[in-house]
Image (cartoon, helix red, strand yellow):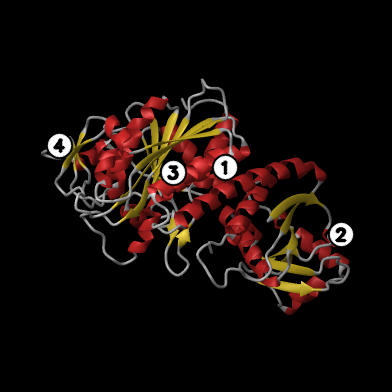
Amino acid sequence: MQITIKSGNPEKQRTACLIAGILEPRRLSPAAKTIDSISKKFLSNLLRRGDIEGKMGQSLLLHNVPGMLADRVLLIGCGRERDLTDNQYRKIVTNSIKELKQTGAMEAVNYLSELNIKGRDYYWKIKQAVEVTQNTIYNFTEYKTKDKTSRRKIRKLTLIVPTRRELPIGEQAIENGMAISRGINLTRDLANQPSNVCTPTYLAEQAKQLAKTYKTIKVDVLDEDEMTKLGMNSLLSVARGSDEPAKLITLEYKGAKKNLKPIVLVGKGVTFDTGGISIKPAAAMDEMKFDMCGAASVIGTICAAAEIGLPLNITGVIPSTENMPGGSATKPGDIITSMSGQTVEVLNTDAEGRLILCDALTYCERYEPDVVIDIATLTGACVIALGNHATGLMSNHNPLAKDLLNAGETSCDRVWQLPLWEEYNQQLTSPFADMANIGGREAGTITAACFLSRFTGKYHWAHLDIAGTAWTTGKNKGATGRPVALLVQYLLDRCNKNKPVA
């Protein structure tokens, strides 16, 4: 879909469909007021009859509105103006695109960016409209042999700003929003692939393909022999039960001078997780193909950064493997020596994400990073704690955590910080090794982060547990692309600050 920006009055828009808001109770938005005036109270009469009241979720499609050049006018209920929040705005835009798809119109002009959202400017509203629109029209039908296409697709959407003065910021908002959407869609495409296609080798190939597309990206892939030489025994212990070879994939995006320390993103890449010997229940095990969403989000974020051309150095580190219960699989009670030299007693082979991440976090030291952020579908406990609304955040550096919290609010891809106190570390005590890989049922999300923190002492680090936010379940199950929007917003904020984290 092509998305453009312009300024202009509603009655002058020659388009298949013009979208305007109706506020509750039966109040016209600025664009709707103009249409009402041109049409000699056509909309006012509809409101008076009760055809639409302006409630959230309502819509009304009109044809041949007097005085209008547009073939159709689509009225969208926006609720009460005083109740308009960031999330309400996103819901309004989502509803407008869903309704637009049903009209058969192939292009439209959208005036919803004129809505007054407290504390948000036109850049934010336009950028959010782009991301929400792309998210709403996304569809993964690669393996469908029937009904792959719905009715006529929307080819062009024009977003409106009040005057020509706002056009430059609107164009920048569209550029950034489209880049982020490409990263999100790439993340979703990778995660939605079945696990018999999306193997560690496939992920490595997709990373290499990205490097062919963007000259600013360099990719390197380590095989199991190379990881063995590095002492990555913890990562390789997870791979033992699978016939699919493990890979350590690194992507280096160079958008700044060499002396600028990189921001390192580490993504958990378990392309299918049976739980290993500690095998999972059968119900919904198909969704364990999504256990590589952290890896997919790293690839998507670096794609977006390259598309925008961010003046930063960003490194992606992706440990990737399957977790299978083969004859050589790691057993509960086994003790392994990680790349850092610390020993781990594996009490549960389904707590494998931390085992592959810990070696990857040690590997990050060679990059002398400014900060390290790992992204992982790590614990079911995070789903219990936060549901699917917020990503869990833990960090050993409060300024970094604060930056991620702020980026989450701006991007509407929110995180919630949990404590990382020494008391929780005590739950990882093992009588036989330096630590156990689980700490019991209590505070499972936090103890998992405590485990990872033992491998991050040489740099500032944050952990994002996306177990509840990376995909949706049920009839319409699928990857969400989170937290790409959050991570790119963090990177954009870093560019604006133009300084390293203190």
**Comes first in the chain, label 3 or label 2:** 2
Front-most of residues 7 and 88? 7
- Image coordinates of residue 453 in percent, x first then y, are 31, 35
Q: Which residue is mark 2?
A: 12
Whether residue 154 is visible here, answered yes or no, is yes
Residue type beneath disc 2 = Lys
Q: Which residue is mark 1?
A: 304
Residue type beneath disc 4 = Ala
**Comes first in the chain, label 3 or label 1:** 3
**Comes first in the chain, label 4 or label 2:** 2
Front-most of residues 37 and 263? 263
Q: Which residue is mark 3?
A: 204
SS at mark 3? Answer: helix
Front-most of residues 391 and 310? 310
Q: Is residue 193 shown left or right of residue 359?
A: right
> Which numbered circle lies on residue 433?
4
